[in-house]
Structure formats: structure tokens, C-alpha cells
Image (tube, grey):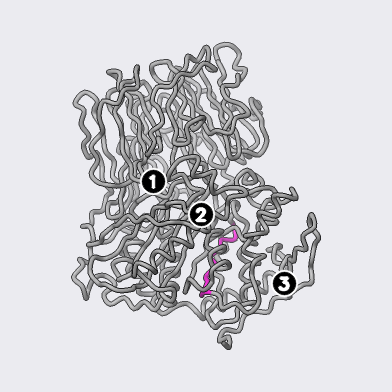
Amino acid sequence: MTKIVKYPEASYLPLVENLHGHEVRDPYRWLEDPASPDTRAWLAGQDALWREARPPLRERFLARLTELSRVGLVTAPVWRGERRFHLRQDAGQEHPVLYCDDRPVLDPMELDPSGLTTLDDWQPDPAGRLLAYQLSRSGDERADLYVGDVATGERVDGPIGGCRYSPVAWLPGGDAFYYVRFHQGVYLHRIGEAEDVPVFERGPVSYGLTISPDGRWLLISAGASYHDVWLADLARGGEPRAVQEGVRARTAAGVGPDGRLYLLTDRDAPRRRLCVADPEAPERWRELVAEDPEAVLGSFTVLQGGRLLLSATRHAVGEIGVHDAETGERLGEVPLPGLGSIGPLTSRPGGGHEAWFSYTDAVTPPQVWRYDARRDEATLWATPPGHVPAPDVESRRLEYTSADGTRVRMLVVARPSGGGPRPAILTGYGGFGIPLLPGYASDSLAWVEAGGVLAVAGLRGGGEEGEAWHRDGMLERKQNVFDDFTAAAEKLVADGWTTPDRLAVWGESNGGLLVGAAVTQRPDLFAAAVCSAGLLDMVRYHRSGLGPSWVGEYGDPDDPEQLAWLLAYSPYHRVRDGVDYPATLFTVSAADTRVDPMHARKMCAAMQRATGGDRPILLRHEPDVGHGARAVSRSIALAADALAFLAEHTRSDPPGFAGDADGVDAAARAQLGRAPVQVVADGALGQEQ
């Protein structure tokens, strides 16, 4: 075919390196430098091309999603004494606002009316008097940490730099706290003092911090793919003592209000078990709740009356069990409103008889529920500020067989009417042990209401079926993830949901790597793709962004054996001349500090040069946002562009959009998500990028 798109000029350099015996071509190395005049000129050309090629349905999606974004947000409470902290987002607000009880205490838009400042994390002190909070600007997630007075709103300390989503563990009295700096180690900060004290350092890995309700015991976890755990007795000098070290396991630990050390671990239990120990002898664990052969344990909380709540996901559907806290015996189950996802359990620091959790499913925006142990009942506690009726969609769970015979599950959401093949979006994640669970996202519903199919595959590499499932899709087994994804696409075609010329894929971050692998390994199977903030050059991924911390997940390109794994699937290195690639949209944010936008720049240039078809390869570039949170209007614009692009190239012509032609109430809409399905990560053990 003849190309109908004239792409910006991109020099193809004869750069070939011999890496451990492999001849590795890197003709677009020059695009790694965002400040070079050549890169700037190339980006300007891509921006002009995207503006010219912006699909005609974009304005219709933008208008509809602007309406849909008005349902708002409310989160489960975090209690400090009698004070209740939570996030709330009303219709029209660009960012969630932090409340204490019913009074707003921190609004990012008041700090920065441009909308480019985000509230990344927050933690009140034990009395609810002071608030440690982290702000980042223009997408740079290397946040600054501040301390504010909750009553007056005055800033009393900070900034402390380099605190990317740092956990904060306050000491009693609110005079000091522990935090993590630069992913390098744990520090002690005393309010008003300039110099912080290093407490524990293990280099550039992920750290976790919790402190016991009485302030005596500090728990520290550290690791890349796996977590070592240390316990410090602050009453006796605070020297950390190993609870678990050098073990291929992920363990979350904390001291409960009953004084026991609780350990939720996949050690000797891929689907996790809950153990307990005396903090004075933390190495002597005993099993309290055994591994469930079909459910993955999630978070837990201890309540008065000897009750223990323990959440789990059973084949990606959430549940909460009620257990005897002393024996671990299962006494019952908390009734839930449907088959959906459960957020982390929260309770008062001292225990109490109440627990709170969020619930969401494909048609239900996240709600907050309250469980009362005295009555053994759960009641709806808070709903988002906006209300919308649920649209008419159906969810089906399918099973299919991957290339090696492994059974994989997939959720398919579609309108009940309309048989025969339809435009479809297939999405997945498949990494870091993070499960992709059912949740509400209005761009998903907008696509389905317009007549499309949404399919969410529970791929290996994720956490849908426990740690063994994760390990079977990491390092040298990463190809299993891509095989699972390909098999999902083939299942959708075989069952008549869609056809290859109407099937699209969409993924972000590690999911962007998934999309890159899909379009380079099976370009014949897909009509279109959206690759957002994806890892695509797996030979040099560890040289930028947070890449060094992901070596435990993907492998080390500097190791000869591991380089071979990576080269086998690295999307950038699998681009071949003359292949008719699917229509592909790369979306990147210039301030992304997790995944360097150079991945998408290089991959886009390579595919634009190589493609033998007439389907476009385009780049959408935003200069002043990053990988994580962004203003609602920015999310709407990104989703509208992506959905319109996929609709155009899957031959989708939505008849009613808002339901005009097929009877769906125009009010049946809700809050926007950034990707075509909400990712609900496990709060206890999930280690996202």
C-alpha cells in the first residue's frame, strides 16, 4: 500500500552495538535527548501531524465525557482521634480536596489555579493536629513534603524534597516522623529542624513504613520485586531487627491494637496467608489464617470483640471475611452490594468496632461502606456527590487457554443488544503482581454504550491469582504475558465478539509495553492501538526514569543471559520493514519521571519509517504533565482523543453516543478514568511502577 501520511523527517543512524554477542541496532538514539534541536523539531512536526489527523469523533467524545465527569469522588475515612480525614471531589473540580470532618483543609487548586499541582499523598499525625502532605508540580512526581496545621491551614514545616509518594510514620506527640527520601532510605525528621537523621538505607528500592498505635514499634519493608522486613523497638534505641531477609517473598507487616505483630505474606503461600508473632520475638511466626486455594488475601484490620476482617479477591472479585482474631476461624462474610472490587480496610488506630472500605464495580462509582462488628452488618456510609443511574450493560467472565495450556480469565463488558462482531477494546496489565480488577470508569462505559465491547484480560505477571501467577509472567517468563494477551484477542474473535479489523488494544505504563509487544508480535490481529507512557526499549529502560528499580521485574540488560530475554520481545527492536502495522497512537507526557518519554519517541519514529501499510502511526505529546495524577480536564481530553482514534480505526460509528438512538438515559454517566478500566491495586502488597 501507499502511505497517505507524510511523517516528520527522522534521521536513521547506522548505530549498531555489540552487546554480549548481540548486534543491537539503535537508529533513533538521538531522540533520547529531549532538549536537542533535532528532537524539538521532530516533536513539533509530530504535534502538527496529530492536530491535523485528530479524528472527527473527538469533539463528540469530548463533549460527552465532559458531562460524564461530574459524578465526583469520595474516599474511605482515615481516623485520628475523633477527627476524620477523607478526599472529596465535587462536579467541576479539577482535583480532589482533602477534608477534615466536613471542612476542606487542602485544595490543590487554591495552591495553584493552573491545575498543574497535585496532592500526591498525605498523613495526619496521631492527634489529627498536624498534616504531612506531598505536592508535585507539572507532572514531576519527585514530590516536596510539607507539614501544615490542620486548624489554621498554616504551613509549619517544609519543603522536604525528593519524597516520591513517601510513606510517613508519625511519632506520638506529633513532634517528628519517619519518611522515605529519593527511594534511597528511611529518615527521621523533627519538626522545625533542618537536618534529618538517616535511619535505614538499602539503596534505590521501594520502602514501606508503619508504626504501632502506641508508637513503640516501627516496621520497615524494603525491596524491589520482593520485600525484606525489619522491626525497630523505638523504646529501646530503635535499632532495626530483621523479621524477614533474603527471602523471595513479599510481606506486609504491622502491629495491631492488640499488640501482636501481623504479617500478610506470600512466603510459602502464593495466594498469601496471615501470620502473627510477638514483637519481642518477631522471627517466631504462627499461621493465623491459611492460604485459600482460590482467593488472594488482601488487606486486614483488627476490631474490638476479637474480630478480624480480611479482604480477598476470588478470581478478581472482592470479598471480606470475618474471622476470630485469636484462632483465625472464619465466622462469616461481610455482605457486599455486588461482584466488584474492595479498597483497603480502614479502622480507628486503637481498633474500635467499626471498619470502612470502598466498593466499586463496572456500573457503580466507588462508594464507602461501614461495617459494624457489634451488629455484624455493613451499611452504605457515603456516595460520590453526583448521582447517575446505571447504564444497561452486561458483564461476562470468560475462560480461555493460552499458548502453553494455562487457563486465563477475562471480563467482557458490552451492551445486551446487538449481536455479531462489534468494535472492541482489549486491555490488560500483566506486571508487578498488580491485579486488574473490576471498577468503574466512565470512558469504559462511554465506549460500551456507544456499541463497543470492552475486554479486560487477567494476564500472568499480575496478581489476579497470587504470587505464582506473578512470577510466571516476569523475568525470563515475560513472554507468557504477551501469549496470554494474544490468546485473549483470538478468543474474542473466535467467539464472535469482534474481528481483527475491528479489534483495538489499549494499555498504559507496563500495559504500554504489553501493547508494544502485541502490535510487533501479532500486527495481523489488531486494527488499532493506544500505547500510553509505555516501556518500549527494553535494552536501555534501566538508564532513565525509575527503570533501575524495575530490574527485579524485567531483568538486567547488562547481564548477558537476561539481555537475551529482553531482546526477544523488546518492541523497539522487533519493528520490521514492510509490515502493515495497526493504526497506533502513542501518548506521552514530557514531565513523566517514571517512564521516560524517549521510549515512545523512538518507537514512533521506528514504526513510521517501517510500516508498509497506510494506517497512521501518531504521537500525542503533552509538555507539562506526568505519569500520575492530573487535572480532570486533562484526563478528559486524553480519553476523548484515545477513544476517538480507536473508534475511527475500528470502523465504529456510534449511533446514539449518549443513548439518543437506543434509549439510554443521557444522565447515565459518571466520573472519568484515565484508562479503559480502573486498576485497583492491592494496598497491602501491590508494587506499582
Residue type at tag 3: Asp
Q: Are marks 3 and 1 in contact (CB under 8 Å)?
A: no
Q: Is residue 289 left or right of residue 29?
A: left
Q: Residue at x 52, y 42 (%)?
A: 687
Regarding mark 2 in the picture, which secondary structure is present there?
loop
Label placed on residue 620? none
Q: Is residue 55 left or right of residue 521?
A: left
Q: Amino acid at mark 2?
A: Asp
Q: Secondary structure at mark 3?
A: helix
Task: Tell me the amino acid under the disc marked 1.
Answer: Val
Range drawn in magenta? 582-591
Residue 232, how many percent across, how many down? 57, 19
Determine the residue positioned at 56% across, 62% down.
517
Compared to residue 502, the image places residue 363 above or below, namely above
Quarter of the rendering occupied by the N terminus:
bottom right
Q: CA distance from mark 3 to mark 2?
A: 45 Å
First in sequence, mark 3 or 2: give its number: 3
Q: Residues within 10 Å of mark 3 (few under 14, many from 20)?
A: some
Determine which residue is flagged by label 2. Answer: 404
Q: Secondary structure at mark 1?
A: strand
Q: Give the total number of marks visible in the rendering.
A: 3
Question: In this figure, which residue is indicated by the disc labeled 1?
Answer: 97
